[in-house]
Amino acid sequence: MRSFQSLTRGSAVLSAIALLSLATACSKPVDTAKTGANPAAMTAPAASTASKLGDLSAFRSIAADVSGLVDKGDMPAAKTRIKDLEVAWDSAEAGLKPRAAEDWHILDKAFDQALKTVRADAPSVADSKQAMADLLKTIDSMQGKK
């Protein structure tokens, strides 16, 4: 059972890293000279609401998994899954932080609070639910979702 969890965790981390690498590689701005598009029309809505951090969906997906486990009251599984979130976030720091340091710090504080709450010696389900809801809300706000 332990080796299955290690294999699953490793696969999740590698998947998150691959998704983040792909998102980073695909975050190149559109070349307007070739497309003839108006750059202001293409970026105005996104620039006003979304963070420069890029695609955070891999982190949101793991956070949603943790939130679901917390909602079920499965705190041991939530503690295990939140480790995947921590590893993915820490692995992506060097690529994300330079893009938008202020946004990164806001998200980092939300990640740290969620990690601290879910990993407490005697974690409160209610506190963990709130911490995960706050984290998801923060991620969504960085992605421009309401």
Image (cartoon, rainbow, N blue to C red):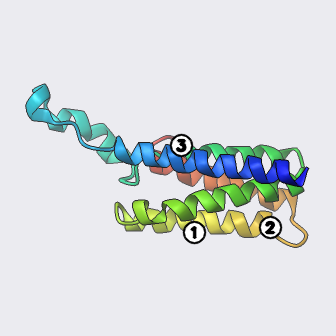
Residue at image point 69% right, 63% down:
114
Q: Relative to 41, say whether 72 is above or below.
A: below
Q: Quadrant of residue 41?
A: top left
Q: How many marks?
A: 3
Distance from Cα at disc 3 to Cα at disc 1: 18 Å
Task: Depth check: give the residue in front, 93 or 104.
Answer: 93
Callout 3: SS? helix
Q: Is residue 10 left or right of residue 125?
A: left
Of the residues shown, which amino acid type is indicated by label 2? Arg
Task: Depth check: give the residue in front, 131 or 63.
Answer: 63
Q: Is disc 3 in contact with disc 1, using a CB cutoff of under 8 Å?
A: no
Query: Which residue of the protein is positioned furthest toward the bottom in this rendering?
Result: 121
Residue at image point 23% right, 33% down:
42
Dot 2, crowdedness within 10 Å: few (<14), some or many (≥20)? some
Q: Which residue is mark 2?
A: 119
Residue 109 circle label:
1
